[in-house]
Amino acid sequence: MTGILVIGAAGMVGRKLVNELIARQRLRGAELSKLKLVDITEPEVPLGAPCPVTAIACDFSTEGTAEKLISDRPDVIFHLAAIVSGEAESDYDKGYRINLDGSRQLFEAIRKAGDSYCPRVVYTSSIAVFGAPFPDTIPDDFHLTPLTSYGTQKAMGEMLLADLTRRGMMDGIGIRLPTIVVRPGKANLAASSFFSGIIREPLNGQEAILPVEDDVLHWMASPRSAVGFLIHAAELDGEAIGP
């Protein structure tokens, strides 16, 4: 049996991940035993879940919250919660409080849990950890030189994840997600949100603004692909694997 905690479960990717988990009814070769959904707004509980589902609205970065979230020792933790790039740049304190301090509190709660607790932690990082100039293909050893506060926060999170994983305190995998398109609804505060807008708005008969030159190249993935990345990371075999 596999217990799962999804932090950031009310977001677009989080909702799709939860739906996929429920549709699969299994993860890491075992049936789902419980599913805990967490976000700043209470996540919706999907119908047809094969196990008990708990939905919690909270700020996971507040002191003592992470300890409560992992109190039932979930086997797999999907950490999707973040302040997006544009907002993290405009609100320095909020970006670091959520993206760095919140992640560190979660990791510290896992480290201090005791009883040899070592969950698989899937951490959503970002291609924002990289900085220009870029090669045509970015290799695994390409240097991290983030050009934004968001990218810096994600790079710090990756290093914390890798260090605790190296020390056997958790089994972490970081995924550097590209821009996920097409996002439904209104544009969010991500600096790259216009990549969804230039597709979404014309389909709705609305004007779309392209704030970059038309020869700009960018990395993208679909929401379905993003969920596939997360599931794959959760199910990878082997000893502790870093980002």
Image (spheres, rainbow, N blue to C red):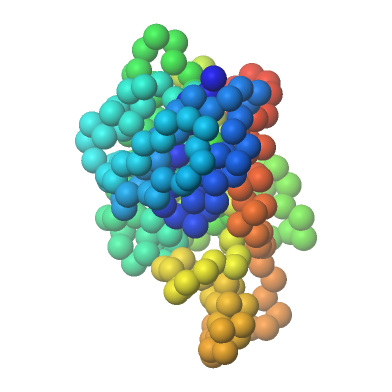
Residue at point 30% right, 62% down? 91
* Location of residue 34 by image quarter: top left
Judged from this view, the residue extending furthest toward the top is 115
Considering every residue shown, the one lying at the far front of the view is: 48
Q: Is residue 115 visible?
A: yes
Residue found 54% across the figure and 56% down from its top: 128
Q: Is residue 129 above or below residue 6?
A: below
List the single residue furthest toward the right.
136
In the rendered image, the quadrant that contains the C terminus is top right
Q: Is residue 121 above or below residue 138?
A: above
The residue at the point 49 percent across, 49 percent down is: 14
How many marks do you count on the picture? 0
206 left or right, relative to 134: left
Image position of 228 (left or right of 47): right
Residue 197, how many percent across, how many down? Answer: 55, 77
23 displayed left or right of 106: right
Does any portion of residue 165 appear in the rendered image? no
Q: Position of residue 207 (x, y in %)?
A: 54, 90
Q: Between residues 134 and 1, which one lies in front from this camera angle?
A: 1
The image quarter containing residue 109 is top left
Q: Nearer the viewer, residue 148 or 38?
A: 38
Say which residue appears at 51% left-offset and 17% top-offset. Answer: 168
Percent position (x, y) of residue 125? Answer: 53, 47
Residue 104 x/y as whole percent: 36, 35
Which one is nearer the viewer's eye here, 49 or 145? 49
Q: Quadrant of the N terminus?
A: top right
